[in-house]
Structures are given as C-alpha cells and as structure tokens.
Amino acid sequence: MTKNKSVEAVIELTDLEFSYNDRIVLRDVNLRIGQLDSTCIIGPNGGGKSTLIKLMLGLLQPDRGTVRLLGDNPAKTRSQVGYVPQSTKYDPLFPVTALDVALMGRLGSRPGRYTAADYDAARAALADLDLEAYMHASFAELSGGQQQRVLIARALVSAVKLLIMDEPTANIDAQAEHSFMELLRELNERMAVILVTHDLGFTSRFFQSVVCVNNWVHIHPTSEITGEIIQDMYGADFQMVRHDHRCAAGGHTHV
Amino acid sequence: MSEFIAALTSNQLPFLRYAFLVGILASISFGIVGSYVVVRRITYIAGAIAHCVLGGIGAALYLQKTHNLPWLDPLYGALVAALMAALIIGMVSIHAKQREDTVIGALWAVGMAVGLLFIAKTPGYSDPMSYLFGNILLVTQEDLWMVAILDLVIVTLVWFLYHNFLAVCFDEEYARIRGLQTSFYYLLLLTMTALTVVLLVRVVGIVMVVALLTLPAAIAGQFVNRLGHMMVLASFLCMGFVASGLAVSYKLDLPSGPIIIVLAGAVYLLVIAGRRLRCFSRRPLRN
C-alpha cells in the first residue's frame, strides 16, 4: 500500500474478523471510507454496527485483519476523531453541565486542568449549535435533542477530519431532525461523516453510500438500496416506506 | 449542646476532641472521594475495600504483639490492606468482565476473615468490635496528623486531576478516545477511596464507614448539578453528621458510629421523601 493512498482514506478496514465469546460478530470486512465521504451504517440489532465503530476507533482489537484510522493505528489517531455516542447511555443523575461535557472534547493525554483556550473552544462549539443559553444547565435536564447537540459540540471541539455518530436521531423530534440534517450537510463540507442508524428513511436523503452490517459488511451507493437489500439484511417481514432516492456520485463499490 | 462544647474544650476527655477534629478534617476527603464513588457507582467496591481493612488491622495487631513492634499501629496495617485491596479489586474489576461482583464479594469476606483469624491468634485481648463498629476511645493525636496529611494529598490530586476524573466517571469510553489512561485513573480513584475509608474507621467502624462516604454525596447530588459543588456540599454535610453525631452520642451515652450513620441515613431518607412529595404536588406537564 502506498503512503499516499493511506492518507486519502479516513478509514481503511482490511480482512477484518471479530468474535465475542467465540461467536463471530463480523467477518471478512473490507471497507474504505475516503475524505469528505458521507456514509451511513445500517443493520439489525446485534448485527455488529456498534462493534464495527468500536473497531474503527481501536476500542476493540480485531481477531484478524487491520484497521487504519486517518492513515495510522487508531490508538494514535482517534483523538482527532469526533465521536458522538448514543445519548441514552448516560446516567440521568450525573452532576455535569453542558459546558462540562463540551469541555471533555478538549481532554488530551496530558493530565491537568483546562486552559482558557479550552473554555473558549468549548463555548464556541456550544454557541455554534445554538446552545448558548444552556451552557450552565444540567446535562441531565436537557431534552433529548439538546443532549444530542451537546454531544455533537463536544465531538466538534476535537474533530478534524472525521465525525462518527452512533444513532444520533434516536432521541430527537422531526423538527430537530431537519436542522440536524442541515448541520450534517454543513459539517460534511469540512470532514467525512459516518452515521449509524436504524432509521432507514434517513439514509438516502443525504448520504453518498450506505454500509449494510449484518455479520458481513457490504457497501452500496445510496441509489442502489432496494427492497431486496433491505430484506436480505433484516429478514422478510420488514415494512418498507417508499421515499425518494437521491442518486449519488460514484458507482457501485461493492467491497 | 453546651455540655458537649465544654467537653470538647476541657482536657478531661482528649479523645473526644481528637475524634471531633479527626471527623471534621476527614469530612473534606469524604465529601470529595464520596462524590466520585457515588457518581461512578462503585459503592459496592468501596464497601469491599473497607471490609478488607480488617485484614490489615488484624495482621498489624498480631505482628505488634508477637514480634514486639510497638510502633506498628493498626492504622498502618489498615492503610496497607486498604491499598492492596484497592489495587486487587481494581484489577479484578477492569479485567474480569463477568462475575465481577462474585469475585469482589469473595475478597470482601476473605479480607475480614483473615483479620479475625489474626486477632484470634494475637496474645492478650483485642476486641474486633471496636474496629467493626468504631470506638472513639482509640483515636489518638497522631491520627490527626495522618488525616491532615491525607487531606492534603487528596485535595491536591483532585484539584489537579478534577477534569480527568470527571471525564472518566462520566464516559469512560470517550475519555479513552481522547487519550486518557482510564485504567490508571480508575485505580487512582480506588486508591484514594481506600485511603479515605481508613481515616474514619476508628470513629464509625469498618461496617458503617461506606455509608458516611456515600450518604452525604448522595444527599448533595439532590441539590446541585456540578460535581465540584457536590463535593463541597457533601464535605459540609459530612462535617455536620460527624459533629452532631458525636454530640448526640455524648449526650445520650451511646456509641458514636451508629448515631452518626443513623443521622446521615435519616437525612437522606427525608431529602428523598421531600423530593418525591414535591414532584407529586406539582407534576410537570407533558411536553
């Protein structure tokens, strides 16, 4: 592999295999995501979506194969990635404010207290997401959509080339979802965006390609997502809601 | 109340004054570390560490008597045991993904068992009850220094690493992505818990000390929305419980440890009940 090529890809997974307690969760995964790509990861629960994300970030080690994140070992490069976990995982009683959470995006391997520059960056990120009024509000008392935006602000404080989001639409209403799409579009001009979702209606409106994960991993341009592919992945009883497809550039890149 | 103040200032009951001052000073560490224990939800682990302390106390008493080591205060044994327990339990909790609670429960009991065996083999009479349930007669002037030094260590560490600890407690996975050595912070947190627990073992006892670590922080958590504020409020609450508990126990001639814990528990229940009642009386509109 030439150096040049590895710089171009934000994520490169080669012949990846991962099993959990002898159960194979992912096998033969080959996936390449380029700079400024917008990629949506879909698949049934237990299919390995979250595992795939954790492998990308080096939080799990593959049994076989290699992971390159921003051209290097994920443990070295993951601090440059903006990561937005599911907001439902947080302890609803935890005493932190929105600003406290956003500041965590400025943490580094060097221990110690935040600097004035850290505070400025966190405040600016919150302001960008229209959260100025909620800076000192308790994180736990914010609405689902607001919590989501705080987590995005935290991710953007450190995101340089890549933003990874896990089920960001699970907890927000239709109007918030609309402005969320606008935000994604804007961010995608600067960085690659990877989003995990179970919400299929979401996929075609924005994303160039769709990665289907169900123990195996296939990548499709969004325009090619058909009933059969969905059925193949989720099983026969899946109800499709028809929506307009927006064709994407870059043909079929079945991997 | 005035009798209690008179007793504190008189020189007839120096142990009462020492216990009072130890309690007030230790409350600083208790509020800080207790807040971390509550938000990180490791009360069970703190309990295991506290109970393992008896192993160290027993070993120190035994060595003191059989090997003629008068300087070997049981407090040193307690410190060593607590630190060992924190590291072992910490490693178990990091590496044993399954059955973590079983292993920790076993360490909890084995630590106590070892202590009781040592005490049984120690010549002369040592009463394990004093260590299990606290006995302010055991508090000495040296303890005051010990508490002051440990307070200083914990306040300094937490001042410097406050945000790192906060991030690890709030979202360990994200902290790891940001480059923090989360296992290191976790073990350091357990080490601080171990040191703190030892401070008040003589005042409230091994069995009850964890309640004094967690109840003030849990009460404080009902009123504040930042971890730092929780620590400050919890420290003051802890001071209040120790001071009023000692006063009541002096007045009624009852053991101080149980009184302090009952007071803290009662306030906690009242606060929770009060919150519930307020929620019922003005139920929010659905939005």
Image (spheres, coloured by chain):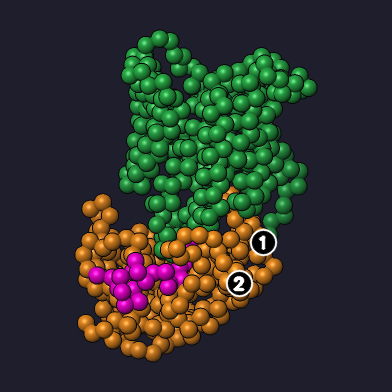
Chain colours: A orange, B green
Residue B58 horizontal/vertical position (percent)? 39, 22
User: Could you classify mark 2 by the number of other residues whose Cα lies within 10 Å: few (under 14), some (14-19), or many (20 or more)?
Assistant: few
Identify the residue shown where x is 55% and y is 23%.
Answer: B139
Name the foreground residue: B277 vs A47: B277
Q: Which residues fall within the magenta stretch?
A: A66-86
Identify the residue shown where x is 50% and y is 47%.
Answer: B40
Q: Residue furthest right?
A: B2
- Mark drawn on residue A120: 2
Name the foreground residue: A235 vs B55: B55
SS category of the residue bearing label 1: loop
Q: Which residue is disc 1 drawn over?
A: A136
From this viewpoint, is residue A240 visible? no
Residue A77 magenta: yes
SS category of the residue bearing label 2: helix
Where is residue B71, by image quadrant? top left
Q: Is residue A108 above or below residue B105?
A: below
The reply to whether label 2 and label 1 mark residues of one chain is yes
Tell me which amino acid carries mark 1.
His
Residue B249 horizontal/vertical position (percent)? 66, 19
From this viewpoint, is residue B50 visible? yes
Identify the residue shown where x is 26% and y is 78%.
Answer: A255
Label 2 vs 1, first from the N-terminus: 2
Name the foreground residue: B208 vs A49: B208
Quadrant, the C terminus of chain B: bottom right
- Mark drawn on residue B233: none
Q: Is residue A85 above or below residue B47?
A: below
